[in-house]
Every structure is written in structure tokens, then in C-alpha cells.
Amino acid sequence: MALATVVRVKGSTPRGAGSKMLIAEGGEQLGTIGGGCGEAEILVAAQEVIATGVPRLVRVNLTDDYLSWSPAVCGGVMEIFLEPLQYD
């Protein structure tokens, strides 16, 4: 598993610092860091963290979400720390 924690935000973001999401190896998740393309990016990065056991910091830029069908772009930047978790 991996734990995603929003550690820093700048501008308008869907969730604030301290928000958490747990991601399982199969992609299942518990909680949210905001949804959309940014969260999808974190789900992909989490699989790498789970596979390697190496934590990483991911910067998600929500200022120009050109893939979104919605005109409601947040306009901020989030930094998310991904850390591997082991369980028995």
C-alpha cells in the first residue's frame, strides 16, 4: 500500500494540506485528495512507490487542466508525499 498526503498547496486546490488517501497495490483507494486528473496522476505514481518501496514527492499542477471537459479548473498546485506502507 501507499499513503498519499497533501503536504503543500498553493492557490485554489480541491483539498488542503493534511488530506490523505490510501492506495492499495491493485489500485483500490480509501479517501481522496481531490479527484480528477490530479488524483489519477497520484494513483499511477503510487503504484511505482508500492513496487519499489521508495517514497517520493509529486507536484500536481491544476492550473491548466487541458484534459478536463469541465471549465472548472482549480487553478492551484498541490505537493503530495507518497510513502510505502507495509502490512501483515
Image: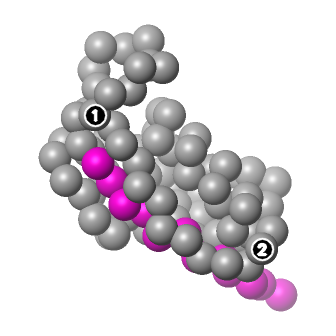
Query: Residue 37 location, x and y as percent?
Result: 50, 34
Q: Could you tell me which residue is drawn at 73 percent across and 79 percent down?
A: 53
Task: Judge from the rendering whether residue 55 lies leftward or rightward of residue 4; answer left or right.
Answer: right
* Residue 21 in sight: yes
Q: Which residue is mark 1?
A: 63
Mark 2, other Cα within 10 Å: few <14 / some 14–19 / many ≥20: few
* Residue 24 in sight: no
Query: Residue 7 location, x and y as percent?
Result: 33, 69
Secondary structure under the numbered disc 2 in the rendered image: helix
Question: On screen, 22 above or below 63?
Answer: below
Secondary structure mostly seen in the magenta stretch: strand
Q: Which residue is mark 2?
A: 52
Q: How is colour applied across the structure in the image?
A: one colour
Mark 1, other Cα within 10 Å: few <14 / some 14–19 / many ≥20: some
The question of residue 87 being in magenta is answered with yes
Task: Tell me the quadrant of the picture where the N terminus can be found.
Answer: bottom right
Task: Tell me the quadrant of the picture where the C terminus can be found.
Answer: bottom right
First of labels 1, 2 by sequence position: 2
Disc number for residue 78: none
Task: Judge from the rendering whether residue 9 lies leftward or rightward of residue 85; answer left or right.
Answer: left
Choose between 51 and 18: the one closer to the eye.
51
Q: Amino acid at mark 2?
A: Thr
Question: On screen, 67 above or below 53?
Answer: above
Question: On screen, 14 above or below 74?
Answer: below
Residue range in magenta is: 77-88
> Marks 2 and 1: in contact by CB < 8 Å?
no
Q: CA distance from mark 1 to mark 2?
A: 30 Å
Q: Could you tell me which residue is drawn at 77 percent across and 84 percent down?
A: 87
Query: Residue 39 location, x and y as percent?
Result: 51, 44
Secondary structure under the numbered disc 1 in the rendered image: loop
